[in-house]
Amino acid sequence: MFMSRLQKLIPLTTVLLLLSFCGELFAQDKVPAEQVLPTGTFAMMSVPSVQEAKARYHDTVWSDVFTNPEMAGFWNALTEPMIKELDNLKAEVGVDWRELMTIPTGEVTLSVARVKRGMIGVSMSIEYGEDATKVEKLLTVVEENLEKAEKTQQTVEFEDTPVVYYELSPEGTLPNRKQQLAWFQRDGYLVISNQTEALEDILLRWSGENSEVLAELEDFKYIRERCRVGDVDPVMYWYVNPVKGVQASLEIVGSTGMATFAAVAPLLGVNQLKAIGGSMDLATEHYEEVTQTVIYADSPQVGLLKLFQAKEIAIQPPEWVSAESESFMIYHWQLEEALLAAKKMIDFFQPGAFDQVMNQLAEHPGAQGLHPQKDFLDLLEGTIAVEVTPPVTGDADDPAATLVALQVKDEERMRDVLAKVQSLEGSSLKVREFQGKSIYSLPIAEQVGELSLALTQSSLFITNSTPRMEQLLRGGDSYPRLKDSKKFEELASEAPEAAGIWGMQQSGAQLERLSQQISQLMSRSTPAGEDSQNQKVLENFPKPEVLKKYAVDSFYYVVEDERGVYWKNYSLRQK
C-alpha cells in the first residue's frame, strides 16, 4: 500500500530524470517526427528535444529531488533492486545501461503504425548526433547476441540507406505475421522497428516533403495546436487513434472481427472517436507542470460517448467541502441523457431489454417492490462529488476519510427509499439520530468497517468515516471550508468560470499523512523475515520538512471543446 502511494506522489516528471543525463542537440534544423511518420500511424509519443526537457526539468521545484543529500538514502534504498537487475543485464548481454542512457541527445519518438493489411509496425527513433561511437558499440553487442541465437543478418538498400534486419519468426511464418529486428542509421538518428516495411515507410518521408504524413492529418494538427503552451514545443506530446488501432489489430484476426466491428461501432459511437492526444510541459511562465489532453470526436455524440457527458457549471466548491481535503473532484454528470443512451444501446440487441431488466430487479422478492431506476436513479440529479481528507480523529492508523456526495432531486423521496430499505427483512442498514439528522450505517467487510449514509444539503452522502459524517452534519465552524480557501482561489484563477468536471490535489496534506503513517510503522518492531527492502525504504523515508519543498498542489478541469473534450491539469509556478 505504501509503495503504491509513493509511486503516485512522485511527479510525472520522474521520467525526465532518465533523459537528464543526455548532452547537447545535434542539429537545430531538422524534420520533426510527425513529418516522417506515415498516415497509418495510430499511436505515437515524442520528446522533441532531450536538451530542452533537461533544461526545463532543472528549472522546476523538483530539480534537485534526486540529488538532494537529505533524500539520498531513500533513493538508494528504493532503486537498489532495479540497479542490481540492470547491472546483471550488463553481465548477461554486455550492455551498460548507464552508457545507454547517454545515447539520446535530441528527439526520441516511439510510434505504432499499420504498415499493410494484417501487419503492425512498432518503431523507435533516437537522435544521437554526430558521434555514433556509442550507437555502433550497442549495435555490435546486439549483432553478437543475435548470432549466438543463430540468427542471420541481412541488409537491403532503400532510399540510399542500408536497412539491417534479422528474421526472428520461425520458418514458414506468413509474410504479414513475421517479426523482425530491423534498423537503419541516417543523419544522426538510429531508427529501430519490428518490420523492415515500417522503416521503408519512414525513409520514404525522410526529407519532410511528403504530404502523406501524420502532421497533415486534421485531428493530429488540431490536437497539437490546442495543447501548446506559448510558441515553443512541449517537453512531450502524444497521439492515439483508437479506431485505426482496433481496425489494424482486427485485420490480423481476420474478416469476421472486422465485420463485427463495422456493425457495432456506429451503435456504440466508437466510430465518432477520432483521436486522443495531448502534451506535457514544464517550467512555463505560469506553470511548474501542465498536461493537456484533447478527445477529438464527431458531434452529436452517441452510444458510449453519450454515457459520460457533463454539463458545465460554475467552478465553486459546495458548502460542505473541507479546506483540509487531500483531494476533491466534482462531476456534473448528465445522468438522464446517459440512461437514455444506455437504454438505446441495450435495446438494440433485444428490444425492451433495459426496462425488462429493471422490472425484474424490482419484482425480486428481496427488493420489496423497490425499482432501481424509478426509486433511485431517477431521484439523482447527476452531480457526483468525491472528497478525501486525513482521518478526522488524527490517528494515522485510521484510513483516509472518503466522502461521496450524490446530488438528489427530492430529499424526502430518497429518505422514504432509505427507510424502506432499512425496514426490509434481513436488512443490515441501521439508523440513528445525530444533530437532527438520520445517519444510516451499513456494515461492510471487517477490514473496511462500515459505511455511513445521510441526507442533507440536497445530497446523499456516503462515507467510510463516521467522524467525518458527524463533522459534516455538525456544520458551523467545526472545520474550514474549501470555498473560503485562498489556495483554491489561486489555483482556480487559471481555470474557466465553468466546467463539467474539475478537481484539485493538495500534495502537502497527502505527504504529511504519509509521513505520519511511516513514523508510526517505524515505531514498531519489525518481525524477522519481513521484506528487508521495504524496511530500508521506510527507514530512509524523507522527513516532512524535506518533502515540503516538493509538495506542489494541482488543479484540473474538463470542458467541452469545439472538436470534442479538452482536459487540463496544472500546478502553478512556484515563487
Image (tube, grey):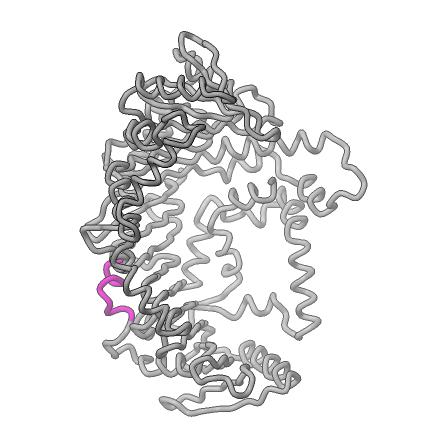
- Does residue 523 sit above or below 127 in this rendering? above
Residue 465 x %, y %: 51, 23
Q: Quadrant of the N terminus?
A: top right
Vertical comparison of 358 with 463: above or below: below
| Residue 240: quarter of image | bottom left
Residue 58 included in the magenta stretch of the image: no
Q: Which residues are magenta?
A: 214-223
| Left or right: 497, with 24 as reference point | left
- Magenta region includes residue 219: yes
Foreground: 362 or 147? 362
Q: Dividing the picture into quarters, in which one does residue 444 lie?
A: top right
Where residue 348 sits: x, y (%)? 27, 52
**Numbered-mark total:** 0
Residue 549: percent from left, percent from top: 51, 37
Q: Residue at x 37, y 36 (%)?
A: 360
Magenta stretch: helix, strand or loop mostly: helix
As rendered, which of 125 and 129 lies closer to the eye? 125
163 vs 414: above or below:
below
Can you give x and y, in whole percent of width and height, for residue 45 in the image? 40, 63
Q: Is residue 345 left or right of residue 129?
A: left
